[in-house]
Image: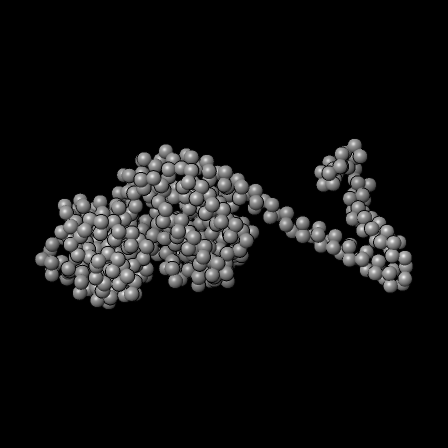
Amino acid sequence: MQLIAFGVNHQTAPLAIREQVAFPAEHLRPALRNLVEHTPVREAAIISTCNRTEVYCSTPEPLQVKRWLAQYHSLSTDRLDPFLYEFPSEQAVSHAFRVASGLDSMVIGEAQILGQMKQAVREAEEAGTLGTVLHKLFQHTFSVAKEVRTRTDIGASSVSLAAAAVRVAERIYPDLAEQSMLFVGAGEMIELCATHFCARKPRAVTFANRTTERAAELAQRFSARAVALPDLPEHVAQHDIIVTCTASPLPILGKGLIERALRARRHRPILIVDLAVPRDVEPEVGNLGDVFLYTVDDLGRIVQEGVDNRLSAVTQAEAIITEGVNDFMQWLQTRKSVPTIRALRDHAERLRRHELERAAKALARGDDPAAVLEALSHGITNKFLHAPTAALHEADAEERDRLVVLLSRLYSFPREE
């Protein structure tokens, strides 16, 4: 079995590809079960965010797993392969550490990915696909990420996508206090965006979500109103800024809907920030003259303007990660000796039971217990020492010297003896 990590991210694949291989949260467990049932995978975990979809698994056939990812999403391998990266063994460990530490994020040092990875691990546990190796890998991953954030300034003054969305809005609208806001969705990203925007005290705020109870919770927190998602078309025209991030597999804001809203607004401009992957907004909406449409990739380019003050911490973080990788690989190497250790113990147990049975029969015959114990101890000792003794007698001179060194180490006695 080989530990591998592969997938696509914001550096290797455009949004149009990433959204095709994304896994909605409710699909993760069925997908994991499907993966282990239809491929030679012993254990697996899937991380799927707006910036990446990655599979971590233990398998002897990495190619089959990559084919599975394409087939699961009804894509040809030729379509997906140019955007895929693959990390075997030690490189997979390093990649996991870098992702969790925020070094592989669109925004260097962002902390949200760590929570997303922990959720992915919980999903794998619930699906029954998180085995010994991946469990150890991710526990080590979270420990290294914590150390990176504790010992370095990698997350200091970080610029989030939410902050970048506010920056975009302030470029278009001089005073956000005069604008009305519509948030579509009720997840962590929407909550974060609402926190940033509501600090500017917009004129009105509305939350729309499939689960109206969750929308109502956010509305109460931010002194806003809540509407049901099916009623969204009636409310779009009333808002100047729309921020959307749902788990919908299909767009919920189409070109026709936005065109009707623009007519109702008499072509007053609308800013739409689409943070969802797959996208919530049809790409054609960006071609409308009175719409400013920003996707997660657009915001990613903006946040790069604020990463320079964190780059000095990257070198220190990489050193921590390298140390962590070495520790994990050492643990992984020790697992290779597990079958040998198990076989050695099984062999010793068989010898012990054989001698114990002989002793029990002798006691049953009425033999002297002291003599039986003496014979038992001699028998066990002779059986245990027979194999190494025979190996020494049968070896040639060169091999005998190597055996002497190994036996001296195994039994901790001076070679002169």
Is residue 257 visible in the rendered image? The answer is no
Judging depth in this view, the residue of 71 and 154 nearest the camera is 154
Residue drawn at the location 67% of the way across and 49% of the way down: 341
Residue at coordinates 37% horizontally, 46% vertically from top-left? Answer: 111
Q: Residue at x 40, y 41 (%)?
A: 149
In the rendered view, tell whether residue 1 sits above or below residue 234.
Answer: above
Q: Where is residue 208 in the image (x, y as percent from the top left)?
A: 24, 62
Q: Is residue 307 above or below residue 282?
A: above
Judge by depth and name the residue closer to the eye, 392 or 323.
323
Along the horizontal axis of the image, is 229 left or right of 53? left
* Percent x, y of residue 187: 32, 57
Q: Is residue 189 left or right of residue 42?
A: left
The quadrant of the picture occupied by the C terminus is top right
Residue found at the far top of this picture? 416
The residue positioned farthest toward the left in the image shown = 266
Q: In x, y percent, where is residue 318?
A: 44, 37
Image side of residue 68 versus residue 182, left or right: right
User: In which quadrant of the rendered view does residue 314 lie?
Assistant: top left
Q: Specify the quadrant of the image occupied by residue 229.
A: bottom left
